[in-house]
Image (cartoon, rainbow, N blue to C red):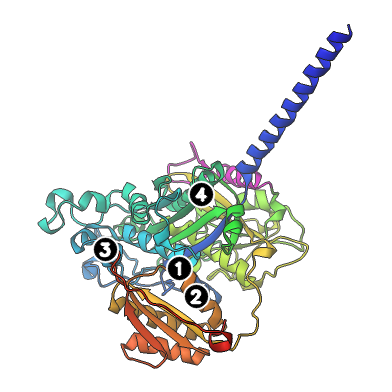
Amino acid sequence: MAEDIAKLRDYLNRVTVDLRKTRKRLQEAEDRASQPIAIVGMDCRFAGGASSPDALWELLEQGRDAIGPFPTDRGWDLERLFDTASGRGGTTSIREGGFLDDVAGFDAEFFGISPREALAMEPQQRLLLETSWGALEHAGIDPSTLDGVRGGVFVGRNYHEYGAPMEHAPDSVEGHLVTGSVASVASGRIAYSLGLSGPAISVDTACSTSLVALHLAVRSLRSGESDMALAGGATVMYTPGTFVEFDRQGALAPDGRCKAFASGANGMGMAEGVGVLVLERLSDARRKGHRVLAVVRGTAVNQDGASNGLTAPSGPAQQRVIQAALADAGLTASDVDTVEAHGTGTALGDPVEARALLATYGKRPKDRPLWLGSVKSNIGHTQAAAGVAGVIKLVQALRHERLPKTLHADEPSPHVDWSAGTIRLLTEHADWPRSDDRVRRASVSGFGISGTNAHVVLEEAPLDDVEPADGEEGAAPLLWPLSAKSPRALAAQAAGLAEHLQARPELRPRDVAGALATTRTAFAHRAAVVGEGRDDLLSGLAAVADGRTARHLVRGTASSTAGGGRTAFLFSGQGSQRPG
């Protein structure tokens, strides 16, 4: 009997230990499945000269309208295209949109791409390649060091009509048309150029594309499939066909502007753009010392299903995707302060979206309303890049502690019962300060014409990841190293950096020195500017830009031949001869 009791006790002890191990493994799996994902870098191009996240924020802070005339550098027959009276086929009454400048401008040599191949590459692919590189540098990651890294690439684009059909293409681009135009290469080329070995997936769910790409990137990071990821989307309209088709359907605003949730909403304003985010698990970002811009807490994707029309939005489906994203984040609706809405300004879509938001986010205290905005009011509906544009806007709003106003929305839509919940349109800028007792959070919505919906929940960076306050500059000389792939590119980089610093006088010279030395790729053509203050350093940049010599400027070219360099010895002495 005693022996049986001992065996039973031993068995129960083993079972208890096994249960504890199982519980621990389950908890670890749950933690991995819901772990926060850090946004550590961003880059973008949008209309109105918004060629970086900071330039986009400046546009939003100033309340500027980026919509303008049709481009004249794409070979469009504008005289035949515009027709306001007869309704001839192939014409449109719309004369404005949100267009990118110089979509043909691409530094093919920088990426080791021949002129013939570059010509065959559709601009969306080029823009995604450029902004992926820029986003990595914004994250403080040298793109040339990523060969073999398990990095995922999840990017999307919409249009597939660049250039002539393959069978009619000129001899000058034959052999490059497949890789230059098929959607899969948009992600594959980025992975190839950087040497990334994680999944490379191209996405097209229309207007929800970049949020779906972000959702896939988050899932890949949480599962351990990727150790870092790029996510985003691009849209370039190669022909005016989008305007012709949507105008014929009556879906476009006559003035080309999105008036989200406003009484004057009368259709979409079509636009172009590109945006890319660099993502890491929050724990990895902290371990690597990367600056955390914001955190992705939750994401969700679903489909309208059998709604009242193939392209018609579904309110119930939108409610479900919002609820799923909040559940993925482990949050309630009252934890979110603001929503960057899809908000295209259509008579059908906006009321459906507003009612879904009221049903999910609207039940909250009267003194803490949900702020509702749409970046489309400034830059237009950028389609595959619309979701990432909203994410970049909110990340910048978190950093600047301010929510920019939505244009053209002074009077809320009368087709929505706004009294059904506590939601307010951002008709003016609103302060959004960091607080000790409340974490700031925001959400972004995207709804595709095919019925694919996406919702993303963002959160401010943890307090210990916030950039430190400015301190006193030391008196020691500083060195600003520059490098590029050609003398012309080196001069352009110096000019661009000088322009950036002139516009941002609050940037500390020592921080600029650290960023240039540790977060940029070292190319063969180099210059080093040395100075004891901002004026010395800026004058050195001007000399590099103009091709002049200066007493505090050194130029040189690094040898690219293995073993071909020369050895130098530095006898630094003792004491104060060598500061630092």
Decide: is 195 above or below 523: above
Q: Nearer the viewer, residue 312 or 271?
A: 271
Spatial distance from mark 1 to mark 2, Cα to Cα? 9 Å
Decide: is 68 above or below 575: above
Q: Earlier in the sequence, mark 2 or mark 4?
A: 2
| x, y percent for residue 189 | 33, 53
Q: Nearer the viewer, residue 443 or 268?
A: 443
Spatial distance from mark 1 to mark 4, Cα to Cα? 33 Å
Q: Secondary structure at mark 4?
A: loop
* Label 4 CA crowd tier, 10 Å (few <14, some 14–19, many 20+): some
Q: Amino acid at mark 1?
A: Ile
| x, y percent for residue 299 | 57, 48
Residue corresponding to mark 1: 379
Residue corresponding to mark 4: 227
| Residue 271 in sight | no
Residue corresponding to mark 2: 59
Picture quadrant where residue 367 is located: bottom right
